[in-house]
């Protein structure tokens, strides 16, 4: 079941402006005049990511499009890290805990993870598990939780915005994998 709050795009006042591009990544997928089912969309992204990465070899998964950039494996690990962080923030909001939450240094987390030592399929499976957990959390929250706010990384954000950011963040990085890493979507001619 999808929350009515989740069918409505978050207002810019519900999140930090830096997340605007993630939400914009979703806008191309909304059908005019039809309600957008965010939970169904979140569900579909695990398969979309797995499909896109199915054509990437272990050697290809070590590719970096420029010096100092993450490998394909590290991008997937980053998606999983962000999934967990945002889900935790949604959990805090859902439980009525408004204690401010710190940010995190995504580059330091990637460096500490030794992600290139693990098979790509393990990273994909881990992302799928994290997304499944996020969906269970989102589906289990009462409707009243989504407009609630927490301060995260010094900025007020709603539960609804965090759920939408999860979707937009994956779309953003899927586009980067395709445009900068040359990872082709097997479903695209």
Image: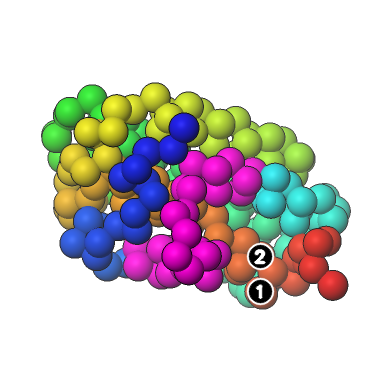
Q: Which residues are magenta?
A: 19-46
Image quadrant assignment for residue 186:
bottom right
Residue 168 falls inside the magenta stretch: no
Q: What whole-number distance in Å separates the C-alpha atoms at marks 1 and 2? A: 6 Å
Taking the spot 29% from the left edge, 27% from the top edge, the residue there is 142
Would residue 173 be found to the left or right of residue 139 on screen?
A: right
Front-most of residues 36 and 109: 36
| Mark 1, residue position | 180
Q: Which secondary structure lies at badge 1?
A: loop
Q: Which secondary structure lies at badge 2?
A: helix
Q: Residue furthest left?
A: 99
Whether the residues at callouts 1 and 2 have beta carbons within 8 Å, the answer is: yes
| Residue 103 placement (x, y as % from top left) | 28, 48
Taking the spot 21% from the left edge, 43% from the top edge, the residue there is 147
| Residue 9 placement (x, y as % from top left) | 35, 58
| Mark 2, residue position | 177
Image quadrant assignment for residue 149:
top left
Would residue 14 be found to the left or right of residue 53 on screen?
A: left
């Amino acid at each position: 079941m999808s929350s009515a709050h989740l069918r409505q795009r978050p207002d810019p006042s519900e999140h930090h402006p830096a997340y605007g591009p993630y939400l914009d990544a979703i806008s191309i997928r909304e059908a005019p005049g039809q309600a957008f089912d965010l939970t169904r969309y979140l569900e579909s992204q695990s398969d979309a990511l797995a499909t896109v990465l199915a054509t990437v070899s272990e050697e290809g998964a070590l590719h970096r499009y420029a010096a100092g950039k993450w490998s394909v494996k590290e991008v997937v690990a980053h998606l999983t890290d962000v999934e967990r962080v945002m889900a935790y923030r949604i959990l805090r909001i859902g439980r009525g805990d408004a204690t401010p939450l710190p940010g995190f240094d995504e580059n330091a987390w990637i460096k500490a993870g030794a992600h290139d030592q693990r098979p790509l399929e393990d990273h994909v499976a881990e992302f799928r598990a994290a997304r499944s957990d996020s969906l269970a959390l989102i589906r289990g929250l009462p409707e009243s939780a989504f407009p609630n706010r927490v301060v995260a990384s010094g900025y007020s954000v709603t539960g609804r915005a965090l759920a939408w950011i999860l979707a937009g963040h994956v779309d953003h990085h899927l586009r980067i994998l395709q445009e900068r890493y040359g990872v082709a979507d097997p479903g695209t001619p």
